[in-house]
Amino acid sequence: MKIDLEFGTWNTRTLLKPGALINLTNQLQKYNLMITAVQETKWTGVEIWDTKTHTIFSSGKNKSAKEGGVAFVVDRSI
């Protein structure tokens, strides 16, 4: 069985704005990116959660600092 995977990186500048995560996942689907490393999320703490289309693994600074932050966004089909 052959599986084609597309990997990418994305500097978002921030995902704190309303609708930013939806816009990001729409763009990832548009470009068929199955696994994407995302920088500058500005999210705090460490979390894993699912959306309808993706699983998100995120890591950021402590709860008071809204800077930096990274995540991996993985398409749920894999």
Image (cartoon, grey):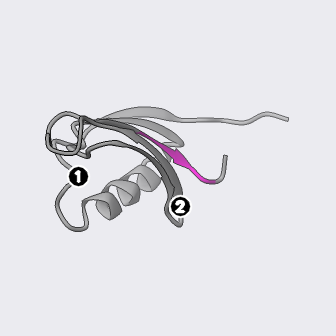
Query: Count the marks: how many?
Result: 2
Q: Is residue 4 magenta?
A: no
Identify which residue is drawn at 24% across, 35% down: 61
Where in the figure is residue 40, as x and y percent of width and height?
A: 21, 37
Image position of 57 with respect to 2: above or below: below
Quarter where residue 26 is shown? bottom left
Q: Nearer the viewer, residue 67 or 26?
A: 67
Considering only order in the chain, which callout, 1 or 2, is on the residue closer to the N terminus?
1
Q: Residues within 10 Å of mark 1 (few under 14, many from 20)?
A: some
* Amino acid type, mark 1: Leu
Query: In terms of secondary structure, where does tag 1 sit?
Result: loop
* Amino acid type, mark 2: Thr
Q: Is residue 74 magenta?
A: yes
Q: Residues within 10 Å of mark 2 (few under 14, many from 20)?
A: some
Q: Is residue 5 left or right of residue 61?
A: right
Image position of 43 with respect to 23: above or below: above
The residue to which callout 2 is attached is: 53
Identify which residue is drawn at 42% across, 55% down: 30
Task: Magenta stretch: give its range.
Answer: 72-76
Of circles 2 and 1, the one toward us is: 1
Where in the figure is residue 15, as x and y percent of width and height?
A: 23, 52
Q: Nearer the viewer, residue 23 or 41?
A: 41
The residue to which callout 1 is attached is: 15
Query: In terms of secondary structure, where does tag 2 sit?
Result: loop
